[in-house]
Amino acid sequence: MADEVSVVSCLFCRIVAGEVPSTVVLETDRVLAFRDIAPAAPTHVLVVPKEHHEDLAALVAADPAYVGQVMAAVVEVARLEGLVGGYRVVTNTGEDSGRTVFHLHVHVLGGASLGLVAG
Ligand code: 5GP
Ligand code: ZN
């Protein structure tokens, strides 16, 4: 968990709270999946824990079982989106990844042959 100040200002916490609009694909008691605002593939959904955790390492450290709930939602999103041809799952961690939002999010990309770099 992050401190209160970063949670209040966190974009994805604000999406989870409904303060910033999003197009929701799936919601469970602990996970939200919504469409990326700038899709990098025909289907591009972000799957996030509703609770604020900065990245995958933080979530593994805080609550490893929660990772399973997030990844189960990823698989369910792929099923709901009809990604029968396959899909890519990406989560950026750390400075070198180029990530821009500091709340764990798993990109689910599909709907086309993705090549080597999408995501
Ligand atoms: P990152 O680069 O941190 O792994 O990915 C952040 C993702 O969040 C990007 O793909 C970006 O398009 C997406 N994003 C940024 N702001 C918003 C927003 O306000 N709403 C939605 N739905 N996606 C956003
Ligand atoms: Zn957050």
Image: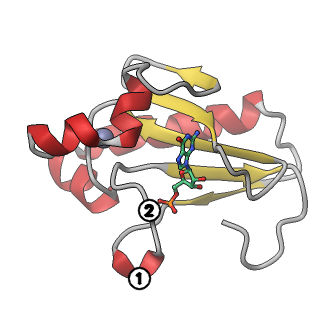
Circle 1 residue: 96
Residue labelled 2 has its Cβ within 8 Å of some atom of ligand 1: yes
Q: Is residue 117 left or right of residue 49?
A: right
- What is the spatial separation of the Cα atoms under label 2 and label 1, in whole angstroms? 11 Å
Residue found at x 36% / y 45%: 67
Which residue is nearer to you in this view: 12 or 87? 12
Residue labelled 1 has its Cβ within 8 Å of some atom of ligand 1: no
Q: Quick one: quadrant of the C terminus?
A: bottom right
Q: Quadrant of ligand 2?
A: top left
Which residue is nearer to you in this view: 8 or 110? 8
Q: Kindly identify the amino acid type of the residue bearing the numbered disc 1.
A: Asp
Coordinates of residue 78 in the picture (x, y in percent): 71, 39
Q: Is residue 45 above or below residue 110?
A: above
Coordinates of residue 14 in the picture (x, y in percent): 37, 30
Quarter of image, res 89:
bottom right
Q: Kindly identify the amino acid type of the residue bearing the numbered disc 2.
A: Thr
Circle 2 residue: 100
How crowded pointer 2 is (Cα within 10 Å; few <14, some 14-19, many 20+) is rated as few
Residue found at x 39% / y 41%: 11
Residue 92 visible in rendering: yes
Q: Quick one: quadrant of the N terminus?
A: top left
Q: Secondary structure at mark 1?
A: helix
Residue found at x 28% / y 33%: 51
Coordinates of residue 107 in the picture (x, y in percent): 59, 52
Q: Is residue 109 left or right of residue 84?
A: left
Q: Secondary structure at mark 2?
A: loop
